[in-house]
Amino acid sequence: MSSDAMRPTGAESLIATLEASGVEVCFTNPGTSEMHAVAAIGRAQKMRSILALFEGVATAAADGYGRMAEKPASTLLHLGPGLANGLANLHNARRAATPIVNIVGDHAVSHRDLDAPLASDVAGFAAPVSKWIKSADRVEDVGAAAAESVAAAMGAPQGIATLILPANTAWEHLPEGVKLAAPPVRVAVPPAPDARMIRDVAAALKSAQKAVILIAGKALLEPGLQAAARIAAATGARIVTDTFVSRQTRGAGVPAIGRIPYFPEMIVDDLKGTDLLVLAGTKAPVAFFAYPGRPGALTPEGAKVLSVAAPSTDAAAALAALADELGAKGPAPLTQLKRMERPQPGALNATNAGAVIAHHLPEDAIVVDEGATSSGAAFGMSGTGPRHDWLYLTGGSIGMGLPLALGAAIACPGRKTVCLHGDGGAMYTIQALWTMAREKTDVVTVIFANRSYAILKIELMRTGVQNAGPQALSLFDLANPEISFAGLARSMGVEGIRAETVEEFEAAFSSAMKRKGPVLIEAVI
């Protein structure tokens, strides 16, 4: 064997560098171009590889992992089409500002110009969701590019770093003198809060008659919430979150805050009379969609808008500095524990199902919410329950919930993860159940089975469509044929239970909260 063949490959340099930079998990659906990377993962010391049966599962799982671990997982995807399969959930991850190292295999550099059937513009596919893109076209550059990708994903603002790995730079051996693992690259930290901006916002809050502070990002973890609550106590300002945020700590022992509604006219009503809107880690509210005759920008007329922290800065630190500037040094008022009462027996609906979930939710749970029209009751009723984290559908692209819960559970194996999901969105990434069973994750999934795309029925009316007719309405109907989610779960190794009454649902949910392992409850509402 030649001395060249004894040296590590580019794929081995990739994995060793990721490990040295703190990346411990890879969610993957690989193909031929990634075989050397797969082999390198198999020989890795620390890297845990997790197989997904669809790339959208891998990308959303990396999102869930990053939101809870507060550091990146990697993906490993196959060429441009594999990346394209995962793009919808990378869109959600971008909106959540989740750090992800998104590794995409490509054809060998010498093969690119041959226009093979799977050839595509990988960088072009990646661009809309990535803050950083690089193709490691020489084997000696693979390690350095891997280290850069981790620093880019973690650096302010956090996001998706896409590293393209041509097949030849994965299989080629490192030149003599090139180290196996490149050293970690320094991560850019958010700038310190702008002192002048803090003073300006503090002065405006003191003179405002009806101020609202809209917060998002890392400000929704405990330090940011504590600071926001101190500001509210000192100024009378109302603290609210965006409609959909990446992660929010809630429950007993945490300051309680509201969130702005989903529909634009409700937002207008909620913010009516506001004369000062302060933004911390977010932007001024806009409607999810355009509607005939209705505004898209929803800032109250005449309101002054100030930013205390741009989305790329440390909003929690800025809120703490603002609280200090206001002299709000006392402890923030905290939510007192008050569990939701158990509902009365009877037919199951979204409201009494939410009461069951809120009553039995354990301490330190992680709740992943893609329940669409059906999870609002559970959210509202759990606000005074045991402390927990709530993760939302940030980018609006459905099919995130199941794999997001998978990734969150991998990041936090000692915590119970509860996934609340609509039946329509669940079918986008139902394959995540198979990986939950394979990895023995502690995820309890509740499928709200209303047999329809219920939100689209609402939107049909709101957009002013007249006389849609039965053929159009059938496009929102999931009852013909009826899907058995409990049966699908069992077919993929997850315990599946069907519940049609409050008694059946409570028995199933309370039991699942007391034991480990993946369970799916089909809540027929």
Image (cartoon, rainbow, N blue to C red):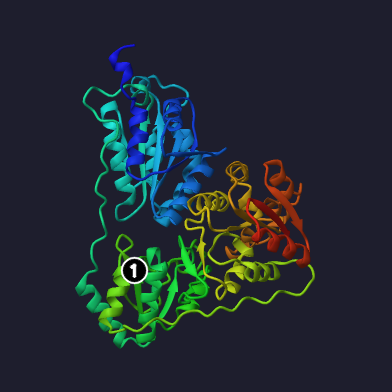
Q: Residue at x 34, y 69 (%)?
A: 280
Q: Which residue is mark 1?
A: 316
**Res 180 visible:** yes
Q: Residue at x 46, y 63 (%)?
A: 245
Q: In this rendering, is residue 358 above or below 332?
A: above
Q: Which x, y percent locates residue 296?
A: 44, 66
The quarter in which the C terminus is drawn is bottom right
Give, as a three-letter code, the residue at label 1.
Answer: Ala
**Res 138 visible:** no
Does 149 sit left or right of 59 as displayed?
Answer: left
Q: Residue at x 36, y 31 (%)?
A: 165
Q: Which x, y percent locates residue 337?
A: 56, 78
Q: Dividing the picture into quarters, in which one does residue 134 lie? A: top left
Q: In this rendering, is residue 193 above or below 23?
A: below
Q: Nearer the viewer, residue 81 or 334?
A: 334
The quarter in which the N terminus is drawn is top left
Does 217 sit left or right of 145 as displayed?
Answer: right
Q: Which x, y percent locates residue 40?
A: 41, 29
Does 419 sit left or right of 236 as displayed?
Answer: right
Provide the secondary structure element on which disc 1 rests.
Answer: helix
Q: Dividing the picture into quarters, in which one does residue 510 lie? A: bottom right
Q: Residues within 10 Å of mark 1 (few under 14, many from 20)?
A: many
Does 243 sit left or right of 223 as displayed?
Answer: right
